[in-house]
Structure formats: structure tokens, C-alpha cells
Image (cartoon, grey):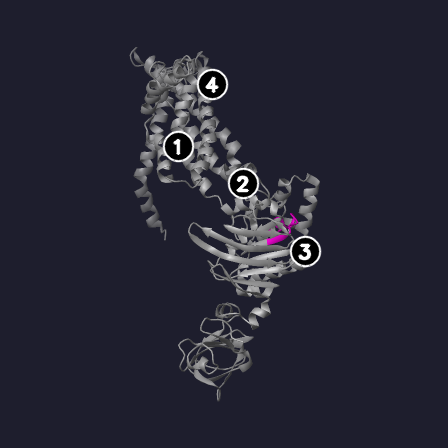
């Protein structure tokens, strides 16, 4: 029974949470916006006043900008493709009744619990190191020259590391979706003469479309901001400088807060463009 | 064509044998109903015929050919599932056309067959809708449509009406019976509802714990149940069973008498008792009478106009011609 009184009481009680949440979002956003219109060099004179759109122009016209956007999109796209394809395959596999199912499922989810920094360092030193890494030993065992993963195949290496981290997430969501598929539908399709591959294409995949959409959206949001994996492996060298990393370099390495903030605003715009784009493609999946 | 023979088939899940060796012959064009309480193996039996479960031993013949190892799609049978199992992301048209598409028919031919099936089932106006936008009865018809277009040797129905409300169930029952008259195809129908079995079947197969208790026409089962289980399962309200002094008089371990074969009177009769609850249905009245010397109340079916009140003393007389006698194994005595 929402009376006038209880409603205003409810508002007052919700206020701290709402204010905290808004403050959490709005203060950094406003500060970024404010700094982006200023020439602000903390170690070289501090706040040097308003400069209008100069930072925005400089950030875009820098030769590093477009390559960084491209790198970002390649990494995000690559990870999405790998995690969704392998996520579907893994979830189908895990859905089969087998001995030790519970343990296997926990093991599959495990990479998600490892911190990005740690997993990137483990990959860098234990697998991809050209001298002591497991891959190097494997290559040598076959008499091949070990690949210098992080310099020769830097972008692919990063995609591999990030995919490994996000595969459990995709698998988990897709597995729950697969488990909710009515087995009678598959049996009906079997009676209707659909071979296994057609059953997958016509029944399972459409059933998964909503879960795939969710994986796509959530992962995109997080993948646009990956940083630790790049920081501890290549430090942005060998063409692995993403937009996020470029902003970090502008702010901390060049000590130019104004320029970095302008980059931050571009990153917000890019994230929104990608999000709108994705919603358009997959939005109809969420309707039905 | 749709003649199916089951020859000594068994089914085990692990160590549990759910279907002991079983023989059954289903003739072309017959409407066969498998009926039994839940867990009696009737759905399993249907799935064995469909090929969705592998039989443990034995042999299935369809139209004289051994179909034991034939995959479900190649057996020429179509199944209607309890949950309808429609494909939710496809329109009604695509749902019905799916088996044709899988068979590789060209588009024009698919359309012709779908339109024809839709016409028979009154679905023409709904072809472009999704299953989610249809009512229960319409979904049921789509599921049947998907089965019809394949022109199967036999239709298999797995409790198709159990998700519908009572009024719709009666309608669909008639529609399925009508469909059987039109198509003259073999139909195998699984249900736990003996009313559905009695009203639709040419031949009823009563199952209990995987064992066939009796096979026969609805009236055969009603008039001459082979044992106590069939006697109690077929007929509504259920048959009354009496033991002890009541059955000794007829020289049997148990006697059974159907509610409609007992006459009731205020003044005189064979057994006396008190009226408990009476249910007035308009056309009939069901009286539950506590007879002296019996634990369970005796159900009596009477005309709609009788006026008995709770607690009235009444006398019951069974029709001696209609008393069923069973021996101590529960089997019918001649």
C-alpha cells in the first residue's frame, strides 16, 4: 500500500544509495569533461587554463589514434569470435552426461577466477617465453624455431590470453541456456528427419541466440577496457596499443591530463557507437 | 500402410527392467490407445516404437520390415509430443514445413502441402504467427499439422491433451477422432485418462508396470475385464469391489459391481447402508453409500432426480447379471 507518506519515506531511504551511485558515476565523468577542455600538465606548470577543443583535435590528429582504434576493435572482435565459437562447442560438450561432470565444470570455470594481471604474466612467462616457455619447448621438440609470441605475433597473443580468461564466462552462460532447451524439441526434430548438424543449426543455435546476445554485449563492454593484459606483456609495443592504453600513456607517461581526458571522452563515444551497433544487430533477438 | 508388430521386446534402464518381454500387434488403420497409471511404461513403449529409445532386446516390425535398428526419421512415423515441441523461433508455416524441408522438397511443393494441412486443421489464418502467439489448442493443431504433412505410416501421440483445459480437451478429442476417420492412418495414442481411451480407441491396451494386462475393444474391456486391475481402471466412476461375506455368497474371492448396475431404494434391497456424500451432476447422481459390513463406501450411479440426503438409510440391490467375479489371484472367473 503506497500511501503518500510511505512513498516519500521510501524515497528518503533510497536516496543515499542513489546519491552514492550518481556521485560515483557523475563526478569522474564531469572531471574528465572539465579536464578535456583544459591544458593541464601536472609536472610542467599544472593547470594552464582553458583551451577549448584543442585537446580533442590533437588527440585525433595524433598518428597513434586511428591505429589504436583499429587495434581495440581487432582485439575485441577476435576475443568475441573465439569465446563464442569455443563457448558453444564447450557448452555442448559439458552438457553431455559424463563421469566427473561437476569437477570438470569447475575446472572449466577456473580461469575466470584468476586475476587478469596474474593470468597475463603466467601466459607471458610460462607459455610464450621464447626461451623457457612451454610453447618454445614444444616447438623445439619438433625441431622448429620457437616463435617470439609477444613480439612476432603480439596481437594474436593478447587475443589468446584474453580469450582464455573470458571463455569460461561465455561457456557458463551458454551452458545454462543449452540446459534449458526442451529435449522434446530435439526429439521432434529427430523424428522430422533432421540430422545432428541440422538439429544444431535449426534448433539449438536459435535457442542460444539470446544467450549469445548477452555474452556479446557484456563481453564487449569489458573488453573495450582491457588494460592489465597489455600492460604486463607488451606495454603497448608491437602494435598492441589500444585506445585505453593510449589514454594511459597520454596521462601518465606524457603527463598530459587534458589530452588524456579528451581521449577518454572519445573512448566513451566509441563504446557507445559499438554498443548501439551491437544492439541494432542483435536487438531483435532480445525482443522475441 | 501402418502395420506394427512388437515381438518379445524388452527395455531396461541400467538394472531396472521397465518393459518385460512384450508382444503386440497393431493393424493398419487402427486407433490404438495405450492406457495405464503413470509410470506404467506406456510412454516408454511409445518411444521404443518411435525409435527415440533403443530396445534392449526383441524386434519391431513396421509393415513387415524389421525396423529395430532403423533410426527414428526413417521409420515413417510421426509423433505429437506432450509439450507439442514446436520450434519457438519459427512461424507456424515453417514449423509445419520443417519435416518437408528436411526431406529436401522444393519450395512450391512445401507450400502446397502446408496449405493443405493448414486447411484441414483450421490454421490458415495463423500461418505467419509464432507458436508463442497461439492458444494451447492451436499449438496442438500445429503439432498435428507437422505430423500430417509427412504422410506417415502411423501417428504416435504422447498424452497430447494433458496440457489443455477440460472443455478444449473434449473438442480436441473429437477432432483427433475425426482426423482418424478422414486419414484412415494407424494411430497410437498414449494417455492415463481412461475416458480418452474409451471414447477414441478401436483397441485399448491396458498396461501396468510394463506388462500388458489386457488388449481389446473398449466395450470388451468394460464388459469382460480380464482381471481386477482392468476392471478397476476402466469405467467411471470406478467399479466397487467387495470381499469376505459379500463375495463368498457368489463363490469368489472378490466380486466387482459397477456403480451403474446397482439399484437403490428406500424400502428394500440386498444390502443396507447409509447415504454419505451425493454428487448431483444433473443427468446423473453419484451416491456414496456406507454399506454395513464394508470399509469403503459403495458408489452408486442413479438418475438425476433422486432425492437422497446425507444420512438417509437406503437399500442397494446389484444386477446379478452384471456382477464380475474374481479369484484370489485377481483373475476373472467365468
Protein chain holding label 2: A
**Both labels 1 and 3 in a single chain:** no
Instruction: State the residue in front, B204 or B159.
Output: B204
Instruction: Tell me the element at label 4.
Output: helix
* Residue located 46% across and 22% down the image: A73
Asked whether the residues under marks 2 and 4 belong to the same chain, the reply is: yes
Mark 3 vs mark 2, foreground winner is 3
Q: Which mark is residue A168?
A: 1
Question: Disc 3 designates what residue?
Answer: B183
Disc on the earlier residue, 2 or 4: 4
In magenta, the rendered stretch is B143-155
Q: Which residue is mark 2?
A: A203
Q: Which mark is residue A70?
A: 4
Label 1, label 2: how far apart the Cα atoms are: 23 Å
Q: Residues within 10 Å of mark 1 (few under 14, many from 20)?
A: many
Q: Secondary structure at mark 1?
A: helix
Q: Nearer the viewer, mark 4 or mark 1?
A: 1
Amino acid at each position: 500500500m503506497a500511501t503518500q507518506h510511505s512513498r516519500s519515506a521510501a524515497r528518503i531511504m533510497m536516496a543515499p544509495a542513489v546519491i552514492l551511485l550518481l556521485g560515483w558515476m557523475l563526478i569522474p565523468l564531469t572531471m574528465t569533461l572539465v579536464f578535456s577542455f583544459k591544458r593541464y600538465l601536472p609536472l610542467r606548470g599544472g593547470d594552464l587554463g582553458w583551451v577549448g577543443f584543442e585537446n580533442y583535435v590533437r588527440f585525433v590528429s595524433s598518428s597513434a589514434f586511428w591505429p589504436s582504434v583499429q587495434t581495440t576493435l581487432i582485439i575485441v572482435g577476435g576475443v568475441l569470435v573465439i569465446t563464442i565459437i569455443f563457448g558453444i562447442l564447450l557448452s555442448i560438450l559439458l552438457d553431455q552426461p559424463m563421469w566427473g561432470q561437476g569437477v570438470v565444470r569447475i575446472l572449466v570455470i577456473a580461469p575466470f577466477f584468476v586475476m587478469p594481471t596474474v593470468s597475463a604474466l603466467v601466459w607471458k612467462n610460462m607459455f610464450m617465453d621464447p626461451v623457457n616457455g612451454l610453447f618454445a619447448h614444444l616447438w623445439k621438440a619438433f625441431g622448429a624455431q620457437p616463435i617470439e609470441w609477444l613480439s612476432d605475433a603480439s596481437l594474436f597473443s593478447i587475443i589468446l590470453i584474453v580469450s582464455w580468461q573470458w571463455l569460461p564466462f561465455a561457456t557458463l552462460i551458454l551452458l545454462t541456456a543449452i540446459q534449458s532447451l526442451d529435449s522434446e524439441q530435439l526429439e521432434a526434430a529427430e523424428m522430422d528427419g533432421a540430422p545432428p548438424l541440422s538439429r544444431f543449426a535449426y534448433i539449438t543455435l536459435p535457442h542460444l541466440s539470446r544467450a549469445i546476445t548477452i555474452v556479446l554485449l557484456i563481453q564487449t563492454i569489458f573488453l573495450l577496457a582491457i588494460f592489465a593484459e597489455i600492460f604486463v606483456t607488451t606495454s603497448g609495443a608491437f602494435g598492441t596499443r589500444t585506445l585505453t592504453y593510449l589514454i594511459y600513456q597520454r596521462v601518465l607517461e606524457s603527463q598530459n591530463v587534458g589530452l588524456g581526458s579528451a581521449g577518454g571522452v572519445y573512448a566513451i563515444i566509441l563504446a557507445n557507437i559499438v554498443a548501439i551497433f551491437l544492439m541494432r544487430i542483435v536487438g531483435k533477438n532480445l525482443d522475441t | 500402410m501402418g502395420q506394427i508388430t512388437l515381438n518379445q521386446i524388452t527395455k531396461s534402464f541400467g538394472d531396472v527392467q521397465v518393459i518385460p518381454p512384450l508382444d503386440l500387434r497393431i493393424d493398419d488403420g487402427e486407433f490404438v490407445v495405450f492406457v495405464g497409471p503413470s509410470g506404467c511404461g506406456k510412454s516408454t513403449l511409445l518411444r521404443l516404437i518411435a525409435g527415440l529409445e533403443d530396445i534392449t532386446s526383441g524386434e519391431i516390425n513396421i509393415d513387415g520390415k524389421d525396423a529395430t535398428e532403423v533410426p527414428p526419421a526413417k521409420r515413417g512415423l510421426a509423433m505429437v509430443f506432450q509439450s507439442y515441441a514446436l520450434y519457438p523461433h519459427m512461424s507456424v508455416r515453417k514449423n509445419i514445413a520443417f519435416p518437408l524441408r528436411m526431406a529436401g522438397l522444393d519450395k512450391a511443393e512445401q507450400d502446397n502441402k502446408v496449405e493443405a494441412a493448414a486447411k484441414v486443421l483450421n490454421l490458415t489464418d495463423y500461418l505467419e504467427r509464432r507458436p508463442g502467439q497461439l492458444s494451447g489448442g492451436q499449438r496442438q493443431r500445429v503439432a498435428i499439422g507437422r505430423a500430417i504433412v509427412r504422410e506417415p505410416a502411423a501417428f504416435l501421440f504422447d498424452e497430447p491433451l494433458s496440457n489443455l483445459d477440460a472443455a478444449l480437451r473434449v473438442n480436441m478429442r473429437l477432432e483427433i477422432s475425426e482426423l482418424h476417420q478422414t486419414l484412415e492412418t494407424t494411430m497410437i495414442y498414449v494417455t492415463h485418462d481412461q475416458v480418452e481411451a474409451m471414447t477414441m480407441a478401436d483397441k485399448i491396451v491396458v498396461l501396468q508396470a510394463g506388462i500388458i494386462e489386457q488388449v481389446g475393444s473398449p466395450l470388451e474391456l468394460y464388459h469382460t475385464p480380464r482381471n481386477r486391475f482392468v476392471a478397476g481402471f476402466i469405467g467411471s466412476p470406478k467399479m466397487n469391489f467387495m470381499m469376505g461375506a459379500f463375495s463368498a455368497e457368489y463363490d469368489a474371492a472378490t466380486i466387482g459391481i459397477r456403480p451403474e448396475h446397482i439399484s437403490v431404494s428406500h424400502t428394500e434391497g440386498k444390502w443396507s447402508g447409509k447415504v454419505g456424500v451425493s454428487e448431483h451432476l444433473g443427468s446423473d447422481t453419484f451416491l456414496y453409500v456406507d454399506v454395513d459390513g464394508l470399509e469403503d463406501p459403495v458408489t452408486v450411479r442413479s438418475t438425476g432426480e433422486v432425492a437422497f440426503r446425507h444420512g438417509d438409510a437406503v437399500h442397494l440391490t446389484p444386477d446379478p447379471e452384471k456382477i464380475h467375479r474374481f479369484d484370489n489371484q485377481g483373475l476373472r472367473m467365468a
